[in-house]
Image (tube, rainbow, N blue to C red):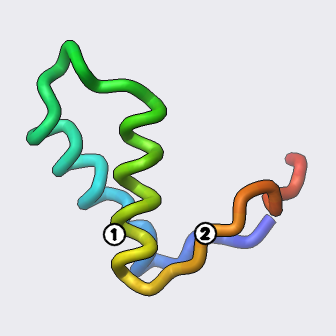
Amino acid sequence: MTPIPPAAAVVIEAAIDDYRCETPAGHQTPEGLATRIGEYLVASGYEIRPGLSEAA
């Protein structure tokens, strides 16, 4: 499994924090959080390639 680069981890943490602050608790969903993380990663120049993760 490829490790997450430290800079990407920072972007992910920012996306999580912003999602929790900006989205009312009753409206937060795993899908919404995943979407926000994807948006932040793409905006930061990372490429999202679903389905390429390796089994543990």
Q: Give neighbour class at mark 1: few <14, some 14-19, many 20+ (Cα, 10 Å).
A: few
Q: Give neighbour class at mark 2: few <14, some 14-19, many 20+ (Cα, 10 Å).
A: few
For this orientation, the residue located farthest to the bottom is 45
Going by the numbered disc 2, the residue's amino acid type is Ile
- Which is nearer the eye, 2 or 32? 32
Residue behind mark 1: 10
Residue 9, located in which quarter of the rendered image? bottom left
Secondary structure beneath dot 1 equals helix
The x and y percentages for residue 4 are 58, 70
User: Vertical placement of 31 versus 41: above or below?
Assistant: above
| Residue occupying image coordinates x 82% and y 62% | 52
Mark closer to the chain start, 1 or 2: 1
C-alpha span from label 1 to label 2: 16 Å
CB-based contact (under 8 Å), mark 1 and mark 2: no
- Which is nearer the eye, 45 or 13? 45
User: Vertical placement of 9 versus 26: above or below?
Assistant: below
Residue behind mark 2: 48
User: Vertical placement of 19 versus 13: above or below?
Assistant: above
The x and y percentages for residue 12 are 38, 60
- In this picture, residue 49 sits left or right of residue 13: right
- In this picture, residue 22 sits left or right of residue 53: left
